[in-house]
Image (spheres, grey):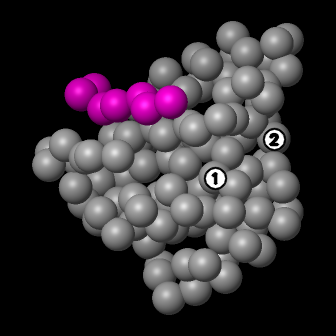
Amino acid sequence: MKLNEELKGKKAIDFGCGVGNDTKFLIENDFFVTCIDKNSESKELVCEKLKSSNEYEFINEEFKDVELPKVNLFYSCFSLQFINPIDLDNVMKKINDSITPKGFFVR
């Protein structure tokens, strides 16, 4: 992934962060990252991988229930397809509302 220079030092969401590889990349590129994953094992793996960083927070919650902070970059790799179709419109509205003007949605 190549990042726009205007985004450096901004806030990002890693939606469905898994083991935190993309989160780590974002932190290394000056983002504060909100990691979101419903899997509690994911939280353990991410916290271990990023133990030397304080540039992230982890939210262990279902996509349909999570409150999303305002961010400049919303990143979701291989997670949107796991949203229950019944909840999809609501989740997509939350995502749209979380992205700042001139922000980016990467999927």
Q: Who comes first in sequence, dot 1 or dot 2?
A: 1
Q: Secondary structure at mark 2?
A: loop
Picture quarter containing residue 83? top right
Q: Is residue 54 visible?
A: yes
Q: Is residue 72 on the magenta stretch?
A: no
| Amino acid type at image mark 1 | Cys
37 above or below 101?
below
In this view of the protein, which residue sits in the foreground, 20 or 63? Answer: 20
62 above or below 27?
above
| Amino acid type at image mark 2 | Glu
Q: Which residue is mark 1?
A: 17
- What is the magenta range? 100-107
Picture quarter containing residue 20? bottom right
Q: Do the residues bearing badges 1 and 2 touch, measured as CB atoms within 8 Å?
A: no
In this view of the protein, which residue sits in the foreground, 25 or 91? Answer: 25
Tag on residue 62?
Answer: 2
* Residue 85: % across, % down: 82, 12
* Residue 16: % across, % down: 67, 45
Q: Dot 2: within a 10 Å radius of its alpha carbon, few (fewer than 14), some, or many (20 or more) residues? A: few
Furthest-left residue in this view: 5
Residue at screen point 47% across, 81% down: 53
